[in-house]
Image (cartoon, rainbow, N blue to C red):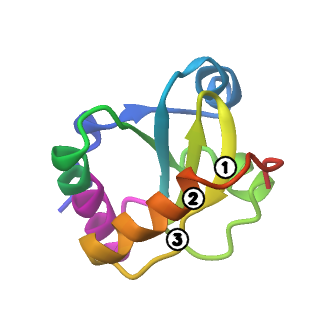
Amino acid sequence: MKINSQAFKQLDQFDYHSVLEETKGISLVLFVKQSCSSCKSWASLLLNYQNFHPAIQLFLLDVERDPGLGEEFELFHLPGIFLYIDGQFHATIQSEARLSQFEAAVQKAVFSLPQETP
């Protein structure tokens, strides 16, 4: 089973920073590998989350296709989830793969101050 990447806006090493800098509102970026079963679960969870929060934009970056960005963000394990608001990095989202816990983690990050991109 592959990740349903059609539901996500695709990013790559050439447009990652420029697209996110220009994106208004809340964006979640999911770093994945197609062979990662946990990544597939998280992709499904994010799509479910978006059903409750349709204004949130979802982006996907495949680190097998663009390994340089995985290295730039120092991803040691996948998936990685990053929250941006109005083009500014706010947080790496860390949560159990349960909708209620993910919701709480995102809410906490939304009210945090912007940070430097990792």
Return the residue nearer the eye: 101 or 37: 101
Crowding at label 3, few (<14), some or many (≥20) Cα neighbours within 10 Å?
A: some
Hey, what amino acid is under mark 2? Ala
Q: Which mark is residue 109?
A: 2
Q: Which residues are magenta?
A: 33-46
Element on which disc 2 rests: helix
Residue 63 located left or right of residue 36: right
Amino acid type for the residue under numbered disc 3 = Leu
Residue beneath label 3, please?
Answer: 78
Residue 85 position in % (x across, y down): 58, 36
Answer with mark 3 or mark 1, whichever residue precedes in sequence: 3
| Few, some or many residues within 10 Å of mark 1 (<14, 14–19, 20+) | many
Q: Identify the residue at horizontal 67%, vertical 49% (top origin).
A: 90
Q: Position of residue 38 (x, y in %)?
A: 35, 75
Q: Residue at x 35, y 64 (%)?
A: 103
* Residue 69 in picture, x, y percent from top left: 70, 47
State the SS at label 3: loop
Which of disc 2 and disc 3 is earlier in sequence? 3
Q: Looking at the figure, which quarter contains the N terminus?
A: bottom left
Q: Do residues under tags 2 and 1 come within 8 Å of each other at their CB atoms?
A: yes
Point out which mark residue 90 bears.
1
Q: Earlier in the sequence, mark 2 or mark 1?
A: 1
Question: Callout 1: helix, strand or loop?
Answer: strand
Residue 102 among those drawn in magenta: no
User: How far apart in space, not on screen, are marks 2 and 1 (Cα)?
Assistant: 7 Å
